[in-house]
Image: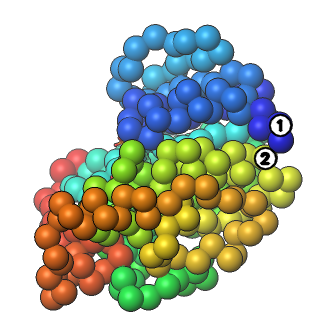
Amino acid sequence: MTINAHNRLLMTGAAGGLGQAMRGRLKANCAVLRLSDRAEFGPAHSHEEIMLADLADADAVLATMHGVDAVVHFGGISVEGPFGPILQANILGVYNLYEAARKQGTKRIVFASSNHVTGYYRQSETITADHAPRPDGLYGVSKAFGEDLSRFYYDRYGIETACVRIGSSFPEPKDRRMLASWLSYDDLHRLITACLTTPVLGHSIIFGMSNNSVTWWDNARARHVGYAPQDSSDVFREAVFARTPAPDASDPAVQFQGGGFVKAGPFPFTG
Ligand code: NAI
Ligand code: 15L
């Protein structure tokens, strides 16, 4: 399959964990990979462009979108915390991104949403994309806002979006919860590639997970995207059980899908 479907692809959040992990991989998906973040992350390599921008700065975000065919949007606050920075990066920032896409004619976005949009479902439940959001904190609420905003921009302006509710994307699952939520870097790249290349994406909500035996999420609503995970947390299961204590079943972090996020905060407003 040809995965090089775009001329210029913009990846935000390039200085972060997933940005660094996807930077090399996404070069196969485009002729030019434009990388953006508010933080410095060194020089451009071949077939790359770097444009620093704070997502809260509408003019800067508009400039990064010039000539861009599609976006992988990783930028923003990635954990629970005070509302001020979340407001700037994840709410104003995602609005600036979609306004820039509308103005520049960019038609497809892969939005890094999060499992924390639905973190208040129980680990005993299996949910689909049709289940209502139940955010487990301000961070989850901000990602739910991004999902709704992207749906509006699809219905009104035809900008297609994959809202990828990423589980836990790290080199390995760090704890027992992540045996259910783990998404390998290679599967994340497969999922992004599927979203970038499927002929008709529409507005889709997709759980970002590998082929883990234990799972809380059902991707039946997103079969049209053609994502086929090839990795599984199962190979880490024994080692994770051996190095982690037996969970306390009365702990909310063990009861709810969002894990420790359901116990984070409250945080003061800091603008
Ligand atoms: P990260 O925190 O390592 O990277 C986020 C990047 O966004 C950072 O480089 C940061 O400088 C940048 N950023 C923050 N505020 C910004 C602003 N106002 N303007 C411009 N850039 C800004 O996070 P990570 O792990 O790489 O995650 C990437 C995305 O995926 C995030 O949106 C996160 O919410 C989402 N996600 C990640 C998961 C994971 O398991 N790694 C799970 C679920 C969602
Ligand atoms: C997220 O949304 C975070 O960005 C990431 O750092 C992990 O905490 C992940 O969720 C998770 O739920 O494991």
Q: Name the residue type under label 2.
A: Thr
- Residue on which disc 2 sits: 197
- Residue on which disc 1 sits: 2
- Indicate whether 143 appears above or below 75: below
Q: Look at 69% across and 59% down and name the residue there.
A: 227
Is 165 or 62 nearer to us in this picture? 165
Q: Name the residue type under label 1.
A: Thr
Is 208 or 60 nearer to us in this picture? 208
- Secondary structure of residue under mark 2: helix
Q: From the viewer's perspective, tell me whether residue 223 is left or right of residue 24.
A: right
Q: From the viewer's perspective, tell me whether residue 39 is left or right of residue 7.
A: left
- Image quadrant holding the N terminus, namely top right
**Precedes in sequence: disc 1 or disc 2:** 1
Q: Are marks 1 and 2 in contact (CB under 8 Å)?
A: yes
Query: In the image, ligand 1 is in what quadrant?
Result: top left
- Indicate whether 214 appears above or below 60: below
Q: Look at 64% across and 27% down and name the residue there.
A: 27
Q: Name the image quarter holding residue 157.
A: bottom right
Is 38 or 9 nearer to us in this picture? 9
- Of badges 1 and 2, the one in the foreground is 1
- Indicate whether 114 appears above or below 171: below
Q: Name the image quarter holding residue 153.
A: bottom right
Q: Look at 77% across and 27% down and name the residue there.
A: 7
